[in-house]
Amino acid sequence: MSLRVEVLYFAALRDAAGIASEHVDTEATDLSALYVEAQARHPVPFGQKRLRVAVDGVFAGWNDPVLSGSTVAFIPPVSGG
């Protein structure tokens, strides 16, 4: 069963993907698999171990399920000063 979610890309991920967000239909069962699908669509430069993931504004784990209608954000490391 296909799920529809909004995917948000931040900072260097947004630059690499060339978009800030997209709506996707996915068969992914967890957030890890959803990111693998994103990597297949876009040349994103980070592996999962370097990213944080959030669902509907709350940090989540890579093994958490994908829920239809959710907004999933992939957040790369951010440097600041």
Image (cartoon, rainbow, N blue to C red):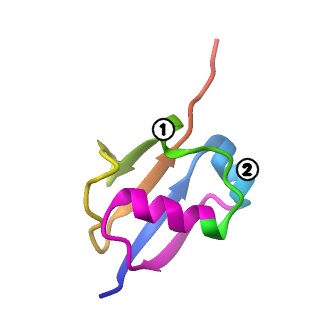
Identify which residue, 34 or 4, lies in the foreground: 34
Label 1 amino acid?
Answer: Lys
Q: Secondary structure at mark 2?
A: helix
Write down the quadrant of residue 77 in the picture.
top right
Q: Quadrant of residue 26?
A: bottom left
Q: Nearer the viewer, mark 2 or mark 1?
A: 1
Question: Which numbered dot is residue 15?
Answer: 2
Q: At which x and y percent is residue 55?
A: 33, 53
Q: Position of residue 59 (x, y in %)?
A: 32, 41
Choose between 31 and 21: the one closer to the eye: 31
Horizontal placement of 4 versus 12: left or right? left
Q: Is residue 34 magenta?
A: yes
Residue where numbered disc 1 is placed:
49
For label 1, the crowd category at 10 Å Cα-Cα, with few meaning under 14, some 14 to 19 and many 20 or more, is few
Q: Secondary structure at mark 1?
A: helix
Front-lying residue, 61 or 79: 61
Which range of residues does the magenta coloring cover?
19-39
Give the farthest residue toward the bottom: 1
